[in-house]
Image (cartoon, helix red, strand yellow):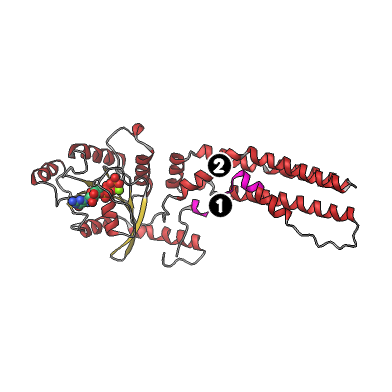
Amino acid sequence: MVTDLNPFRRIPTIMTADEIIEYAHTKSKKLSMKSSKEIKKIPRVKIREVARLQEYVKLVKSKLLEVVEGFPTIDRLHPFYLELTEILVGTDKLKLSLGAVHKCIPPISQIMSDHLEALKLSQDHKQMKKTRSAAKGRIASIVRATKKNLDFLIEAKKKLSRLPGIIPDSPTIVCAGFPNVGKSTLVREVSTAEPEIAYYPFTTKKVIIGHLQVREHRVQIVDTPGILDRPMSKRNEIEKQAITALKYLAHVIIFILDPSEACGWSINDQTNLLHEVQRMFPIIPILIAFNKLDIAPPEKIEEAKKLVPDAYEIVATEGTGVSELLQDAVDEVDIESLQESIESHVASLTGRKPNSID
Ligand SMILES: Nc1nc2c(ncn2[C@@H]2O[C@H](COP(=O)(O)OP(=O)(O)OP(=O)(O)O)[C@@H](O)[C@H]2O)c(=O)[nH]1
Ligand SMILES: [Mg+2]
């Protein structure tokens, strides 16, 4: 099974500044020293204090490094993830926060070496303990000073791990259209995805991916949030995610129209959006489907047909007309040319020789 197709899900749990300090403090305090009773008190305390400080620093540094190294390299992200990172958290802010956390490490190492020096020279066991606590205090201040960055990274990880895992170049159908037209109903009906369905608009707030088999091909189908017919600059974060999915994932688009207008928008508004999508993605094949034909009055269907003469006719809730639509959608994809890159991508993820993706 290929897991973690979303690179942000591989990031280990990120601790807050206070959690890192507490974790390193508690764990380093428990360090038991097996020094023989025969060693005199002063050298024994010295060995213990040195070891505890070293352990404390090692733990703090490893937690900070884990954060920095756990994030995928932003500039090497697949454009789908890169653009969604920009939309959801801001790539510059993300890079700055990661850089700031990384920059904490050299001063922490410096504080450790300065205080180890002092510890080694000291001959007084009380002084040794004081030196160790002073070092820990200064290190804790550095970690606390980067609290905002850690909090931002925790939030970024949370948002970005909710993105779907994609297999780049796997044959991909993206469903798009106005809110409430039945996109999720169709995706749920035909694939492994289980998006929420509701009678009100903007139910789907993120991109969701499902898988299905069409003849001998395994295909990704993408459910997107509804898009309104308005200028790009006015679109919100949720609509922009749908545009990103169309831009970077779609080999073919299924554009759903609701001639019944039960969705809440006129067929005219819906076709305006269709024309915009056609203008934005002139190279991607677009199959247009009229949905909810079970409730659309005949005059509304006629009106829609005048605007879009050759649309597929479906009832997503019942699966009517759906398999022909999907088969034709897959026929639009040049599957053979994609096959090679899918196999090598899967192999790179699993470290196995290319074979099946599940
Ligand atoms: N009668 C009828 N209702 C349908 C059909 N397809 C979807 N619906 C209903 O339309 C409403 C919206 O369906 P969704 O699948 O949530 O629509 P969506 O396009 O994903 O909506 P957003 O996520 O808000 O953009 C729900 O109440 C569905 O039950 C259909 O073929 N016939
Ligand atoms: Mg939906």
Q: Label 1: which residue?
A: 13
Q: Residue at x 29, y 56 (%)?
A: 188
The Cα–Cα distance between marks 1 and 2, rounded to whole angstroms, is 12 Å
Q: Is residue 267 left or right of residue 189?
A: left
Q: Residue at x 68, y 51 (%)?
A: 24
Q: Is residue 236 left or right of residue 153?
A: left
Q: Residue 14 lies in magenta, yes or no?
A: yes
Find residue 246 and report its horizontal and vertical position in percent.
34, 46
Q: Is residue 94 left or right of residue 163?
A: right
Q: Label 2: which residue?
A: 151
Is there a contact, CB below 8 Å, between mark 1 and mark 2? no
SS of the residue at dot 2? helix
Q: Is residue 134 visible?
A: yes
Give the residues in magenta: 8-21
Identify whether 66 is placed above or below 111.
below
* Residue closer to the observer: 199 or 258: 199
* Residue closer to the observer: 13 or 91: 13
Find residue 226 and report its horizontal and vertical position in percent.
30, 43
Estimate how packed mark 2 is, as few (under 14), some (14 to 19) or many (20 or more) residues with alpha carbons within 10 Å.
some
Q: Earlier in the sequence, mark 1 or mark 2?
A: 1
Q: Is residue 255 visible?
A: no
Position of the N terminus by quadrant = bottom left
Q: Residue 112 lies in magenta, yes or no?
A: no
User: Disc 2, ligand 1: is the CB inside 8 Å?
Assistant: no
User: Disc 1, ligand 2: is the CB inside 8 Å?
Assistant: no
Q: Quadrant of residue 83 in the image? A: top left
Q: Quadrant of residue 309 in the image? A: top left
Tell me the kind of residue under disc 2. Asp
SS of the residue at dot 1? loop
Estimate how packed mark 1 is, as few (under 14), some (14 to 19) or many (20 or more) residues with alpha carbons within 10 Å.
some
